Image: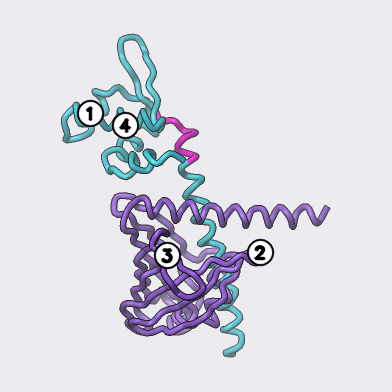
């Protein structure tokens, strides 16, 4: 696997957006499937040691992906991604929210609008994701939550290191 | 992490000030000369950056010099980096999935 795949991550607090660009070593139809089919999403969407587990998926305009992020101790964080606009293999627009096992959205938690653009980069595919938050506080909360997940990852690595001793 | 830090960083002029101060300590006058706004506006920005401890001031003779507070900047950086790393991990996982799919298709 090439180590030189393009990756760009920027947080712009003037318009409350996070821009994430990443190149993948596969053609557009394959990468598109990875982002839009739940059986594939479940294989990569949550960073280890978390896993994503789909409850229901309807990838169509007005449809939803309802899934849980399952933690190393079995804890569940439910998310609901609602698809607003889809242009096959080019882009999709979705609303991302946290919720519960029954699919109710938790309005207290940060919500964001996701625009995912797919384009060719020679034989590879570039995915440009734009996460737009309604205000700065929601962006910060999301980063804080990500920080906690990052910490879980770090602890896990530490456990593995200690186990080797 | 104090919330005001992000408010401080949300403003493009304040970010530009930080970029200026990243290379050298400067007096408020010298900073103001770099911008097309009033000295007053610039000194308000500097005040906010000082309150958030993103810049520090030092008296040198008659002049006050402002410089960047590296430790504080690193703190902000570290925080955003954690989030960035999560995405990096996620994408590395997708790389693995993609290479498996491509092998299956061959």
Q: CA distance from mark 4 to mark 1?
A: 15 Å
Q: Tell me the mark number nearer the camera, choosing from 3 and 4.
A: 3
Q: Tell me the mark number nearer the camera, choosing from 2 and 3.
A: 3
Chain of residue at mark 3: A
Of mark 4 and mark 1, the one earlier in the sequence is 1
* Residue B94 x/y as whole percent: 55, 72
Residue at the spot 46% in from the left edge and 40% down from the top edge? B1
Chain of residue at mark 4: B
Q: Tell me the mark number nearer the camera, choosing from 1 and 2.
A: 2
Chain identifier, cyan in the render: B
- Which residue in the protein does label 4 denote? B48
Determine crowd level at label 4: few under 14, some 14-19, many 20+ residues with C-alpha closer than 10 A: some
- Which residue in the protein does label 3 denote? A106
**Colour applied to chain A:** purple
Q: Are marks 2 and 3 on the same chain?
A: yes
Q: Are marks 4 and 1 on the same chain?
A: yes
Q: Tell me the mark number nearer the camera, choosing from 1 and 3.
A: 3
């Amino acid at each position: 696997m090439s180590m030189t795949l393009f990756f760009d991550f920027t947080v712009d607090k003037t318009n409350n957006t996070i821009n994430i660009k990443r190149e993948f070593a596969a053609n557009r139809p394959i990468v598109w499937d990875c982002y839009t089919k739940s059986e594939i999403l479940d294989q990569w969407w949550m960073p280890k040691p978390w896993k994503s587990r789909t409850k229901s998926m309807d990838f169509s305009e007005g449809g939803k992906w309802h899934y849980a992020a399952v933690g190393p101790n079995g804890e569940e964080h439910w998310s609901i991604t609602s698809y607003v606009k889809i242009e096959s293999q080019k882009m999709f627009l979705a609303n991302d929210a946290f919720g519960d096992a029954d699919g109710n959205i938790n309005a207290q938690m940060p919500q964001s609008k996701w625009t995912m653009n797919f384009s060719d980069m020679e034989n590879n595919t570039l995915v440009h994701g734009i996460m737009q938050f309604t205000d700065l506080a929601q962006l910060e909360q999301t980063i804080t939550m990500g920080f906690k997940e990052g910490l879980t990852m770090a602890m896990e690595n530490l456990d593995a290191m200690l186990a080797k001793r | 992490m104090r919330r005001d830090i992000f408010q401080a960083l949300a403003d493009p002029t304040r970010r530009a000030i930080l970029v200026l101060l990243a290379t050298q300590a400067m007096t408020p006058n010298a900073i103001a000369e770099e911008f097309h706004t009033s000295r007053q506006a610039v000194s308000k920005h500097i005040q906010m950056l000082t309150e958030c401890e993103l810049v520090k001031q030092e008296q040198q003779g008659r002049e006050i010099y402002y410089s960047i507070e590296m430790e504080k900047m690193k703190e902000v950086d570290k925080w955003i980096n954690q989030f960035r790393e999560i995405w990096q991990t996620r994408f590395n996982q997708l790389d693995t999935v993609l290479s498996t799919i491509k092998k299956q298709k061959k």
